[in-house]
Image (spheres, grey):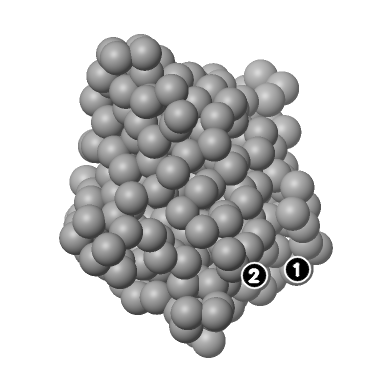
Amino acid sequence: MHTQRLTLTLTALASAGLLLSACGTESGAGSEGGSGARAGDAGQPVTGVRWNVESLTLGGKKYDAPDDAYLKIGKDGRAGGSYGCNHAGADVSVKGDTLDFGEPLLTKRACADEDRMTFEKHLTRALGDEKFTAKVEGDRMTLTTAKGDHVDFTSGPAEPEAPLTGTKWTVRTIGEGKSAAALPKALSDKVHLTFGDDGKVRGNLGCNDVTAKAEAKDGSITFGAPATTRKLCPGDAMKTERALLKLFDGKARYEVKRDALTLTASDGTVISANADQKNADRKTDDQKKDDQKK
């Protein structure tokens, strides 16, 4: 049987958070001898499909998955997804219709919803402990262990990419190269940037609010000098702010994949953020204040 080695770099990416080189936006299957692994009589590919997690059954007890839990294995052997709260990465060996996951690595975000954390704990343990047989029928995939435990998925359409402009981007991780660290718990969901259609970026750096010029072109953003408020904050907040300030008064590369934004400053600092869709296309309070002054 054909054997593949797939690396699950489950981003978000956002992700989240842990591994920023998550899957691309490819769809469909590869060639029979390539990375378009298939399982089941219907011939539905395992790769190139966004598999939404429906439920997990362990020892006869069923756990419903959070709405945004999903897994996508790219045709190139890279994937992106969420275990319920955190993004995760693991190696998996695919032999025919058998999948054997390695030990997963997760980001360290703590979610207030206990059901999310419980589901993530069970799914993480299940995927790392057993081999699975994959069965795909139409838009459904089931991974089943020899003991009868199983994870049920449905395929979903690819999500459109969030626009860079008008989206509130909540910062999740800051690091260098492939190493990324989640923000301190006290700053979770508080650090954000919004690029306006007026050529400015506004947000909060962890302690102070910031405003600066920001012109996006050809995969890069040219930032102007930042104007910030002048509050003094505890150590973690100031440390995060100092790291984010490296973006400004210079040029940074950017990449948007669905709801994940990656910014790479000229000194190699890498910042990942996720889109807050509820705030997409809305003006920030600072923008409204600026409009009132005009």
At numbered mark 2, what does the secondary structure look like: helix, strand or loop?
strand
Q: Where is 30 relative to 159, above or below?
A: below
Query: Which residue is rendered at x = 29% and y = 55% of the image?
Result: 136
Q: Is disc 2 surrounded by few (<14), some (14 to 19) or many (20+) residues within 10 Å?
A: many
Q: Where is 263 relative to 60, above or below?
A: below
At numbered mark 1, what does the secondary structure look like: helix, strand or loop?
loop
What's the amino acid at mark 1?
A: Ser
The quarter of the image holding the C terminus is: bottom left
Query: Which residue is rendered at x = 32% and y = 43% of the image?
Result: 142
- List the residue tagged with mark 2: 252
Tags 1 and 2 in contact by the CB under 8 Å rule?
A: yes
Farthest residue toward the bottom? 218
Q: Is disc 1 surrounded by few (<14), some (14 to 19) or many (20+) residues within 10 Å?
A: some
Instruction: Please count the marks in the image.
Output: 2
Based on the displayed image, in which of its 4 quarters is residue 254 positioned?
bottom right
Residue 84 in percent (x, y) is at 38, 32
